[in-house]
């Protein structure tokens, strides 16, 4: 399914389709330094893929298929630029990587409201830095969402300031969700999105190292003298000797 392929591509990097289509947007002019570093799923990675470096960029290859580019552009919205309110929440809680242009502020509403594009999620395990001790989880997200209430969004954009990744917006302030129809069509059946959005990530603590079953050799008896053996020679994985030629 070609739509499913587009869905998978957007999950990997939501900036690529617009750049392939040479569609002007504010992200295309941002973060254009060439220091050789990029984050997976970010705008710089998308530019490297589309424009190419020493290799031919995807933009030139896609340019041979203008019908495909027109098809992608038609799917970007295909009508309203924003899905229904609860569909926005569904996308945020799914954990998929997608772009959402909105007017937003900080959690407490103290910052001046600004308009920009977020790489948004509400799924705890998908939040950037969720495995660190400094990660903060707003308790409001533990309760079911009520229509017209605040929408809390964790911004996974690689350029976002670590201390202000959580943003606060409202549905009426959500301006664009590109390719939302494609995302909604496949996100429910995506195994990567399984589990409750509030689930904590698996602990990264290393497993306790198991002691070797031969570490305490005093528990073994020599087959020949039946004495406790401090140093044993192992034979066929079952027999022990104080010494063995």
Image (tube, rainbow, N blue to C red):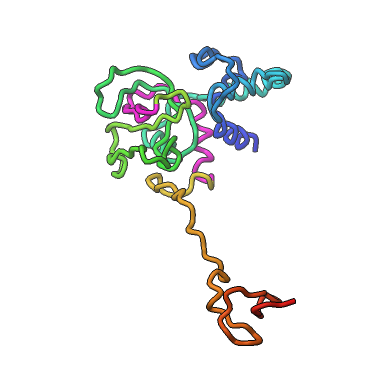
Q: Look at the image and say whether residue 188 sits in the magenta stretch.
A: yes
Question: Could you tell me which quadrant the N terminus lies in?
Answer: top right
Foreground residue among 213 and 20: 213
Residue at 66 percent of width and 80 percent of height: 239
Foreground residue among 129 and 104: 129
Residue at 33 percent of width and 23 percent of height: 104
Q: Look at the image and say whether residue 72 sits in the magenta stretch.
A: no
Q: Is residue 100 left or right of residue 75?
A: left
Foreground residue among 7 and 234: 234
Report the number of numbered marks.
0
Rendering quarter of residue 54: top right
Name above or below for residue 189 compared with residue 222.
above
Q: Position of residue 139 (x, y in %)?
A: 28, 41
Q: Position of residue 113 (x, y in %)?
A: 30, 18
Foreground residue among 42 and 175: 42
Residue at 55 percent of width and 69 percent of height: 215
Question: Could you tell me which quadrant the C terminus lies in?
Answer: bottom right
Q: Position of residue 153 (x, y in %)?
A: 37, 32
Rendering quarter of residue 80: top left
Rendering quarter of residue 228: bottom right
Residue at 28 percent of width and 20 percent of height: 111
Q: Is residue 89 left or right of residue 143?
A: right
Q: What segment carries the magenta color? A: 162-190
Name above or below for residue 221 compared with residue 118.
below
Q: Position of residue 70 (x, y in %)?
A: 63, 20
Name above or below for residue 223 compared with residue 164.
below
């Amino acid at each position: 399914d070609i739509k499913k392929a587009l869905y998978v591509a957007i999950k990997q990097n939501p900036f690529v389709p617009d750049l392939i289509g040479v569609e002007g947007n504010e992200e295309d002019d941002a973060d254009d330094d060439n220091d050789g570093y990029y984050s997976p799923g970010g705008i710089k990675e998308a530019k490297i893929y589309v424009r190419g470096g020493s290799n031919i960029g995807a933009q030139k290859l896609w340019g041979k298929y203008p019908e495909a580019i027109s098809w992608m552009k038609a799917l970007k919205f295909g009508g309203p630029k924003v899905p229904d309110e609860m569909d926005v929440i569904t996308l945020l809680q799914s954990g998929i990587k997608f772009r959402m242009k909105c007017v937003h502020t900080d959690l407490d509403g103290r910052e001046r409201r600004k308009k920009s594009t977020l790489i948004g999620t509400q799924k705890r395990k998908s939040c950037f830095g969720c495995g660190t001790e400094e990660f903060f989880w707003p308790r409001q997200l533990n309760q079911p969402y009520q229509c017209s209430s605040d929408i809390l969004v964790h911004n996974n954009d690689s350029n976002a300031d670590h201390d202000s990744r959580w943003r606060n917006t409202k549905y009426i302030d959500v301006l664009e969700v590109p390719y939302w129809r494609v995302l909604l069509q496949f996100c429910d059946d995506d195994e990567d999105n399984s589990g409750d959005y509030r689930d904590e990530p698996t602990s990264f603590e290393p497993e306790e190292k198991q002691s070797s079953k031969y570490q305490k050799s005093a528990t073994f008896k020599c087959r020949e003298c039946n004495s406790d053996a401090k140093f044993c020679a192992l034979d066929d994985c079952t027999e022990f000797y104080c010494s063995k030629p």
